[in-house]
Amino acid sequence: MPVFDSFAALDQAREAEGQTLGVVKPHKILGLDIAPVDNAEWTPAEREKLEQNERQIGLFDSADQKSLATLRKLPFSFYYRYESVVDGKLEQSRHKIADWEIGALFWKCKQRYGDDWESPFRQKMVDDLTSKDLSFLMGTIHRFPDQWLIVSLIYPPKQEMPISGQQSLLL
């Protein structure tokens, strides 16, 4: 998987080579935007499509094993604002986070804290994750090849630099 130091470099690879998936390593996270969605409930057409997918029996399922449980729609969209270095200059970008973990975190915070969900949610998404070595797995959607989404967040712990004069065990 190619790693890019900026969104601009990833988008250039899309235009030049048809790249539709890549890892972007942001220079700095500027913030997390939370925006209410236009419709907090599924439309009848969306609900029908979800129910149709849920009714399909998997390869190893029997008809009586399949139970219908409708996916809850997120009432908010979440976006990271971040900076990357492009040609020696800082460039700002903003992308929607489509990672399933952000939805799970929202519902967990909503269940645990009720209407006060936003503070612990931001603490995890901004304070905790940005203290790690955060990267974005970014991808496009077939119908909209020039629109990028953060498909997954990659956040291993930051690697500590060895004390000078001390060799790493992994040489």
Image (cartoon, grey):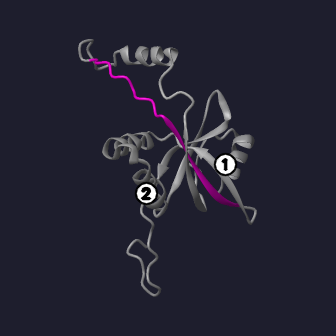
Give amino acid for label 1: Leu
Residue 69 sits inside the magenta stretch? yes
Point out residue 41 in the picture as x, y percentages from the top left corner.
47, 25
The local crowd at label 2, few if under 14, some if 14 to 19, many if 20 or more residues have their Cα within 10 Å, is few
Point out residue 95 in the picture as x, y percentages from the top left corner.
61, 45
Asked whether residue 19 is in view, the answer is yes
Residue drawn at x 48%, y 34% as measured from the top left: 75
State whether residue 13 is above or below residue 128: above
For the view shown, which residue lies furthest in the front direction?
A: 115
Magenta stretch, residue numbers: 66-85
- The residue that disc 1 covers is 10
For the view shown, which residue lies furthest in the left direction?
A: 64
Point out residue 163 in the picture as x, y percentages from the top left corner.
44, 83
Left or right? Give the position of 42 relative to 117: right
- The residue that disc 2 covers is 123
The local crowd at label 1, few if under 14, some if 14 to 19, many if 20 or more residues have their Cα within 10 Å, is many
Residue drawn at x 66%, y 31% as measured from the top left: 144
Asked whether residue 5 is in view, the answer is no
Alpha-carbon span between mark 1 and mark 2 = 29 Å
Give amino acid for label 2: Gln
**Quick one: label 1 or label 2, which is nearer the N terminus?**
1
Residue drawn at x 74%, y 41% as measured from the top left: 15
The label nearer to you, 1 versus 2, is 2
- Tell me the SS state at disc 1: helix
Residue 103 occupies quadrant: top left
